[in-house]
Image (spheres, rainbow, N blue to C red):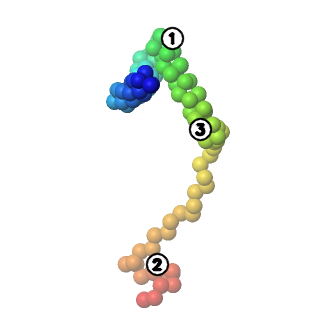
Amino acid sequence: MIALLLAVAAGFAVGYVARCVRPLARVDDWAWEQDYVRSVDLRDDPGRRRRPGWWLAQIVFAVEVAGLFIVHPRRVARQWRHRHDPPPPRGPAVTVISTTDRASSDRQGAPQ
């Protein structure tokens, strides 16, 4: 019984520390830095894309996408299918009516 209580207390302690340190957020930030912050380096020399940090960042992104598919499969699949849909049609243009111009207010049938 004592071992179970110690295991539960250790689990709470690990959870608290993980919440404060946020290791997954740090890994994600590192991956974004490898891929996007250093994009100037990649633009200047595309051969640098083969460096280990860039490939590890791609693995981190793949694990994140797989995690999203596991947690929210239907939502992610729907978003993935519709990511390149054209924008919805625009409405008609707005007509601005001047309140100081009598000629335009006469055309609109407004009382004088």
- The amino acid type of the residue labelled 3 equals His
N-term-proximal mark, 2 vs 1: 1
Identify the residue at image location x=41%, y=23%: 2
Residue indicated by mark 2? 104
Please indicate whether residue 71 sits to the left or right of residue 103 in the image. Answer: right
Whether residue 23 is visible:
no
Identify the residue at image location x=61%, y=55%: 89
Residue 55 vs residue 21, the one in the foreground: 21
Give residue 50's mark. Answer: 1
Front position among marks 2 and 3? 3
Whether residue 97 is visible:
yes
Which structural element holds mark 3? loop
N-term-proximal mark, 1 vs 3: 1
- The amino acid type of the residue labelled 1 equals Arg
Residue 84 vs residue 11, the one in the foreground: 11
Image quarter where the N terminus lies is: top left
Identify the residue at image location x=36%, y=30%: 16
